[in-house]
Image (spheres, rainbow, N blue to C red):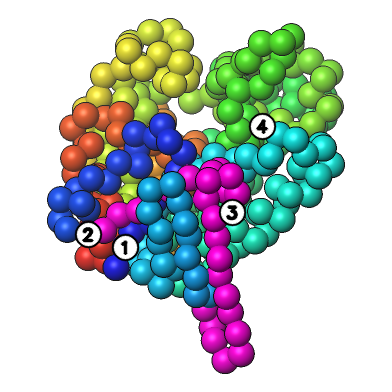
Amino acid sequence: MTVLVLTRALDASSDISELTERGVPVCRLDPGDFPGSLTLGARIGPGVGHWAGTLRGQHRDLTLGEVSAVYYRRPSPFRMHPGMTDQDTRWAQAEARAGFRGMLAALDCVWVNHPSRNAHAELKPISLATAGRCGLSVPETLITNDPAEARAFVASLPGKAAAYKALGPGGPTIYDGNAHALWTTQVRAEEIPDTVGLTAHLFQQWVPKAYEVRVTAVGHRLFAAEIHAGSDASRIDFRTDYDSLTYRPCPVPGPIATGMHALLDVLHLRYAACDFLVDQDVGRWYLVDVNPNGQWGFVPELREPITHALADLLEGKCP
């Protein structure tokens, strides 16, 4: 019985040291080390429904049959040999995804979460529609590449303002030679340029909020904390100014808990961190983001109980 943690080298949220304290073997590997310092050998044959073989890393070997659970966090991209041409590098990366990641994805064990489930849930059109079907409130949202429709949508909203946010989970983009993070911004109709026509964009009703809530689901356990902004920047996107934030653990209202459990069941997730805006007028909770691989360590009071619940989940002690 070994828990396999798949993530990059610098990832504090992958630290499940409690498993080691419980005597559960843990093997941490970064798939990005393949094929340079991580070697795979796996076989399958007639009448066999699983792969047998070994992962050989810098510090230890792991027999595939040992793996009882996989914690899939944030693996880095495959790093191919620098001497390869661009065309050969693209081909080799595609082969690595199909072979190495494909073989790992075939492991029949507990996944938190399986990469195919993460990829499915990370698509905002899917996660927001699923949340609505599960009884959770979602703000009025438009996805479009039509600038005129975007302007008309924003102009029709209460307050004549919308939140613009990236559709994908990607990191900073390069513009004018510099890296720019795609934070949530507030926009009005007259501020929407014609360049919206170049790709898909998401515009969401601006909800005047009292505060935000991060609800972290680990199996059937829910952990919630209010997030109170202490600066103008963090009131628009709390990720821009963590130093100004204050946190307060809070209960999850019954209808929200029911919706969260249904959401994870439908999306086949064992873990998710969901963000809600709490309306300042009537206290209504609006779900705005489903993060199947979201951070969980930044709320101090919840760090220990979430770590404990994750360890239980990976050890097979809870559904």
Where are the magenta residues, as a range? 24-50
Q: Are marks 1 and 2 in contact (CB under 8 Å)?
A: yes
Residue behind mark 2: 24
> Quick check: 302 left or right of 56?
left
Ranked by sequence position, the earlier of labels 1 and 2 is 1
Q: Secondary structure at mark 2?
A: loop
Q: Amino acid at mark 1?
A: Thr
Ranked by sequence position, the earlier of labels 3 and 2 is 2
Residue behind mark 1: 2
User: Quadrant location of the C terminus?
Assistant: bottom left
Q: Secondary structure at mark 1?
A: strand
Residue behind mark 3: 120
Ranked by sequence position, the earlier of labels 4 and 2 is 2
Identify the mark at residue 202; answer none if there is no mark. Answer: 4
Q: Residues within 10 Å of mark 2 (few under 14, many from 20)?
A: some
At 71% from the left and 55% from the top, the residue drawn is 95
Q: Amino acid at mark 3?
A: His
Q: Position of residue 212 (x, y in %)?
A: 37, 28
Ranked by sequence position, the earlier of labels 3 and 4 is 3
Q: Amino acid at mark 4?
A: Leu
Q: Can residue 232 be found in the magenta stretch?
A: no
Q: Secondary structure at mark 4?
A: strand
Q: Are marks 1 and 4 in contact (CB under 8 Å)?
A: no
Measured Cα–Cα span from mark 1 to mark 4:
41 Å
Q: Which dot, 3 or 1, sits closer to the camera?
A: 1
Q: Which dot, 3 or 4, sits closer to the camera?
A: 3
At 15% from the left and 56% from the top, the residue drawn is 22
Measured Cα–Cα span from mark 3 to mark 1:
27 Å
Q: Position of residue 247 (x, y in %)?
A: 25, 24
Q: Residues within 10 Å of mark 3 (few under 14, many from 20)?
A: some
> Quick check: 200 left or right of 303?
right
Identify the mark at residue 236; answer none if there is no mark. Answer: none
